[in-house]
Amino acid sequence: MKRLILFICTLISVFFSSCITNKDVVYFQDKGTVLNDSLLLKETSKPYRVQVNDILSINVKALDNELTKIFNPVETTNSNASQGGAQLYFNGFTVDLHGNIKFPILGEINVLGFTVEQIEEKVKSELLKQYFKDTAELFVTVKLAGLRYTVTGEVNGSGVFTLFQDRVNIIEALANAGDIKNTGDRTDVMVIRQYPQGQKIHHIDLTDLVAMQSPYYYIQPNDMIFVKPLKRKALGAGETFTQTLTTVASIFAIIVSTYFLTKNL
């Protein structure tokens, strides 16, 4: 009987230590890693450089609109963003395996590794050389055709998402997917990022304030965000004190019933 009581006490202590605490679910905690408040404002966001399979929206404007129609096959509005995204898939400028886009009149233009600002200057320069006069007052804008990313794991709504914004941080991306479940590990969120040489896996602790300074705080097109389950979930313990207490009580009742049944045999 003493062994049974000892086993039950051990089981209870394990389950109660497995409860999900406030530290497990709160974002951006001060863990002593931030030296002063000014660091909180220094978010790291490097200009994105275009990669293979990206889709670009390129808009050309000049004094004579008739001359620019050939360059602007897609007209989209903010009120019809989802449809515009679908149109750009077919009519936008896709970066091929060699890093080129096929642009009217100019032919192939290499854009691999360039920022959108650099592509704007490159397209404008080539158009002025080959098609427009210097007096055309040419204006070129280049944007990514939506920021597409994937979220999976311990989240409330996994899937592939597209946001029509220039910058999206990982908190916004996760919120768009329904946020991380209480059973998700916020201390070790994986970001699988695409590079010219392949994919790399990065890690970010979203419970620490210094996450805002991470180079992976702002997501990039084609990022995959994976949230692992907490180890506590594998034990089958409840997320709250009440759920854990109910689980322990059920196990305790089963053990006691089994003990007395076998004892009377």
Image: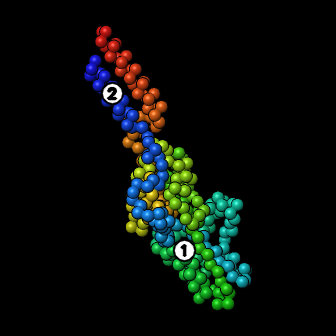
Question: Foreground mark, 2 or 1?
Answer: 2
> Mark 2: which secondary structure?
helix
Is residue 138 visible to us here? Answer: yes
Q: Is residue 222 above or below residue 175?
A: below
Measuring from the top left, give residue 119's x and y in whole percent: 54, 77
Residue drawn at (57%, 53%) of the image: 176
Query: Mark 2 packing: few (<14 Cα in 10 Å), some, or many (20+)?
Result: few
Residue drawn at (61%, 87%) of the image: 128
> Mark 1: which secondary structure?
helix
**Does residue 201 appear left or right of residue 176 in this picture?**
left
Of residues 103 and 17, the one drawn nearer to the viewer in this rendering? 17
Measuring from the top left, give residue 28's x and y in whole percent: 47, 55
Q: Is residue 139 above or below residue 86?
A: below
Residue drawn at (33%, 25%) of the image: 8
Of residues 47 and 5, the one drawn nearer to the viewer in this rendering? 5
User: Residue 116 — which label?
Assistant: 1
Measuring from the top left, give residue 133's x and y in whole percent: 65, 90
**Does residue 32 appear left or right of residue 94 in this picture?**
left
Cα distance, mark 2 to mark 1? 62 Å
Measuring from the top left, give residue 186's x and y in whole percent: 44, 50
Q: Extreme front residue here? A: 36
Of residues 241 and 226, the one drawn nearer to the viewer in this rendering? 241
Query: Mark 1 packing: few (<14 Cα in 10 Å), some, or many (20+)?
Result: many
Which residue type does callout 2 highlight?
Answer: Cys
Q: Where does label 2 land, which residue?
A: 9
